[in-house]
């Protein structure tokens, strides 16, 4: 039943490692995946807003700079997701949910936030 709620809570806050360790919480693969993506989405969104306010740039022109700034972070996250979540996960339902989460978060970034900065990451 908890897995069913993961899709409904697609916009919920990221998992806090400090709080989770302190409370000795465990999570499904797809919860970790959703949380990592959500953290990255929020980070990039706040940087786009900063570029809009501080440099008076529109999202498309700021993406040129942000892609350079976040390239290594996005590549590291992608490699970690690929090597530690996807390759080690043998649960078909978890992998299916991660695909659905990826699609829903791509829609959230494109439709709601109108940002295409993470398209490369989500497409992989």
Image (spheres, rainbow, N blue to C red):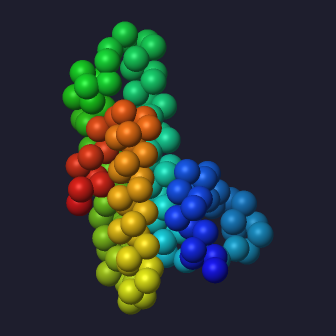
- State the residue at coordinates (35%, 68%): 99
Whether 75 is drawn above or below 6: the answer is: above
Q: Quadrant of the C terminus?
A: bottom left
Give coordinates of residue 77: x percent, y percent: 36, 58
In the image, 64: left or right of 25? left
Identify the image quadrant of residue 44.
top left
Identify the image quadrant of residue 57.
top left
- State the residue at coordinates (31%, 18%): 58
Q: Is residue 117 visible?
A: no
Whether 18 is drawn above or below 81: the answer is: above
Give coordinates of residue 93: x percent, y percent: 43, 83
- State the residue at coordinates (29%, 38%): 116
Q: Is residue 1 visible?
A: yes
Whether 17 is drawn above or below 91: the answer is: above
- Residue lying furthest bottom: 90
In the image, 6: left or right of 112? right
Residue toward you, 11 or 87: 11
Residue toward you, 118 or 100: 100
Q: Quadrant of the N terminus?
A: bottom right
Give coordinates of residue 114: x percent, y percent: 36, 33
- Residue lying furthest right: 23
């Amino acid at each position: 039943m908890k897995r069913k709620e993961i899709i409904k809570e697609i916009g919920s806050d990221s998992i806090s490692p400090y709080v989770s360790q302190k409370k000795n919480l465990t999570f499904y693969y797809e919860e970790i995946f959703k949380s990592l993506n959500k953290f990255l989405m929020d980070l990039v969104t706040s940087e786009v807003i900063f570029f809009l306010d501080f440099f008076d740039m529109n999202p498309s022109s700021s993406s040129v700079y942000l892609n350079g700034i976040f390239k290594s972070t996005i590549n590291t996250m992608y490699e970690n997701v690929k090597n530690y979540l996807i390759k080690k996960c043998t649960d078909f339902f978890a992998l299916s949910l991660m695909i659905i989460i990826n699609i829903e978060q791509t829609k959230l970034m494109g439709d709601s936030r109108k940002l295409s900065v993470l398209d490369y990451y989500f497409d992989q």
